Each structure stands twice: as C-alpha cells, then as structure tokens.
Amino acid sequence: MNEKVLDKFWSLSAEAGVIGSMILDKDVAPKVLAIIENEDYFYKPEHRILFESLVTLYTAGKPTDPVMLRDELTQRDKLDEVGGVDYIARILDSVPSSANSEYYAGIVKERWHYRQLVGAVENMQQVLDEPLNADEQAERIRQLAANLPTNGEPKGCFTLKENAEKVASAIAEKENAIPTGYRNIDRIITGIRTGELIIIAGRPSMGKSALALGIALNAAKDGKIVLYVSLEMGHRALIERAVGMAGDLNISLLKRFPQTDKIYERANEAAHGLSKYNLTIHEGLNTPEKLASFVLKQNKIKKVDIVFVDYLQLMTTKGRVENRVAEISAISRQLKTLAMTEGIPVVALSQLNRECESRTGHRPRLSDLRDSGSIEQDADIVLLLHREDYYRNADNPGTEADGITEVIISKNRRGPTGIVKLVFLPETVRFGDLSEGQDNE
C-alpha cells in the first residue's frame, strides 16, 4: 500500500500534536474532548495509552504536565509500554505550542472515521459470504450502515432547545403510548412506547402467550397495526385462542357443540369482530434478520405499530456466535436495535430458568432470565409472571385454583417497579383485571 493511501488511515504527527498540546496546556483538554470522544480514535497503541492517561488526570482535576503524566503511567505500569520519558520528550519537541490542538484533533477524527468506513465495508463483504438469503443480507448491511459514525454532528443528536417542550407535551398527552389494556399494569408502566423492548417472562404454563396475545388484541382493537410472530404455537391454535378471548368462550367446549347451538353463534360473532383487526400472525420469522427484513417491507406499505415475538429462545441468528448465550445476547440486541431504528415497540416473550422453582415462594427474579444476562440489559421493561396456585396444585393435585397472577414489574426504565395482580381465567385462556377494590402491591 503506497504512502498516499496509508495517509488516509492515520496521521501519527496529528496524534502526537494532540498529545503534546494536552501536555503543554491543560485548558485544551475540553476542546479536544469535544472532537475526540475516546482513545479508540488514535491509531498508534502508545498514543491511546497516553491520551487515556491525560484524560484521567484532567477529569481528576490534576495537572497534565510531563511529571504528573509520568507518575500516572508509572502507577498504571504503562510507562515502558509507551516508550518511556524519552518518547514523551520527543512528542513535546515536535509540538511547539498548543495553539493548533483542535486542528490536530480534527485530523485524528477524520482518519479514525476513514478506518471505520473501511472496517464497515469489510464487514459488509463478510455478510455476503454468510448463508443468508438476499433480503437478510440486505438487512444486515443496512444495520451496519446505520451504525456508521458521521464526521459531522453525531447521528441521533437532539438539543433540549428544540425538543424539551415537544417531549413534555408528548408525556402529558401520552403520545405514542400503546396501552396494554390491563388497568393495573398500565397504572405503573403507563403504556408501551416506541423504541422500547418489553420482555414478558415466566416459567412454562404461567400464561406468557395468553398475556401477550391479550395485549396484542387490545392494541389491534385500538386501531394499531400489530405483527405477532408465533414460533411455538401454530396460527390456527392462536386464532382459536383469540376467538375464545374475544367471545369469552371455552374453545375446547365449543368443538363439542353443533353449529346450530347458540355457543357457535357467539363464536361466529367474535370471529367477525376479529376480522376487522389489523393483526398479522407470522410463523416463519425465526431469526431477527428475517423479522427486521419483514418489518422494513411492511413499513413501506403501512407502518407496523407494535411487534410481538413468541418466544425469544426459539429464535436463532445467522451471524457467527460462540455459544448459545452469545446467540441469545445477539438476538436481544438486534430486537432492541429494530425497536430503536424503526421507532416501534417490540414485545418479546422469554423463558426463565428453573432456579425460581426451588426458591421459597417460587417468585421469579431478573437473574432468572434464561440463557443471557443481556436480555435484562437490553430490555426497557421486564414483566415476570408468577402464579402461586400453579405450584400449590403441583404439590397437592386437585387444589382449587384462584387464578391470581402476579405481574412483577422488575425493570422499568421510565418509572417505578412493583407487583400488580391479574386474574387468569383458564377456561378462556385469558387474563382479566381484578376489581378496583382488590389490592395491588
């Protein structure tokens, strides 16, 4: 590679100029930091260490002169790694003053930006070698391109001057919030908002799908365009549940009656009502890449308002991963990215591990999320479902169930956490609100 091309990748003289300016004059640090966000902008490893050490001194309110820099590097056992005091002296000899610090910083940022572009192109080339179809490859490449930094104002930069009043008005009007339709849940989380990843988690038979479908139907009834990705239950079984929920019917009993019975008429009325809902069930979106590609296509026709994934652990990813934990981490991160980039909420169901079943009281915790701690990290809201009567019946078969279900709001980025209660109606496989007089924690 010729010298002219290499010059696009880095400028060691500009990097030295930034370092030398910061050593000569402590007051240039805030000017430099407004341009260079961190040590990764530097190409030379020695310069990364020196920059990081100078920033540490500055943020601690200490001088950034050669003596303090030497002590900081010695304390971190990094002095020899940067070439000792001799290399620091050479840098200072090459920088006569700190007057051009911002100019040097601009060059460093420009070269870093070019290296990012080249790296992104290489990653895009690798995507073309992965076993994905054309739509999935296109979506992966779009995601890589969307994450590219710009050399001007950062992407996603919003000033308080332009946005504070708008956001305050939106809060007051609950703009863009989609109610779950369950009074006690909405009382705490105040609905589901754009860009959020909501996790509904629980052990098997706790009612995850029933709650998710209930929220989906409530959103569709409210005129929202809903996409329900069903990876565990077939579309027919899911629609039967929806008919049962809408008509307050026991579907298993319905199948025993002839079509002339009144119960069939009720089912037909419920089905007719559901046919007006804009809710799409998809059984084939088993990777986040496929899901993102489908949502992008749908949004060109009419924007999807909310997406449900039932459930997260049944997804896989076409990207290269080391193990299942890394794969689930990648999936949850991609679901959150989809929510952010497309401006829609994503509600994903998740399994919990067995730890809660051996715990006194059986109440689940955030740490019980199965396969990955990154689900907890990526999620904006986490709802953990707990039905104590399920465990009572397991210990004493025949025990009458009261249907009380705790919805443990264990994470809520926008507000408080807590426990609310719903009633589970097994005949119709749906949840309902408790009466106003019954307590919630």
Image (spheres, rainbow, N blue to C red):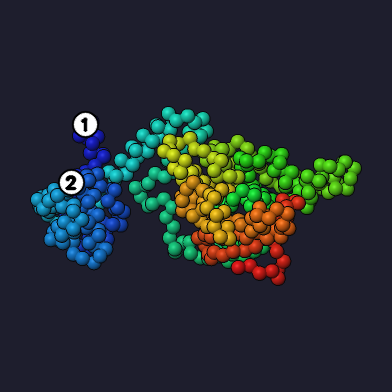
Question: SS class of the residue under badge 2?
Answer: helix
Residue designated by label 1: 2
Which element is circle 1 on? Answer: loop
Q: Position of residue 15 (x, y in %)?
A: 21, 48
Q: Residue at x 48, y 61 (%)?
A: 163
Kindly identify the amino acid type of the residue bearing the numbered disc 1. Answer: Asn
**Residue 220 spot, x, y in % from top left:** 68, 50
Disc ID at residue 210? none
For residue 208, above or below residue 10? below
Quadrant where the image shows the N terminus: top left
- In the rendered image, the quadrant that contains the C terminus is bottom right
Callout 2, which amino acid?
A: Ser
Pointer 2: residues within 10 angstroms few (<14), some, or many (20+)?
Answer: some
As drawn, 420 above or below 295: below
In the rendered view, tell whether residue 416 sits above or below residue 253: below
Q: Residue at x 23, y 53 (%)?
A: 51
Q: Is residue 124 visible?
A: yes
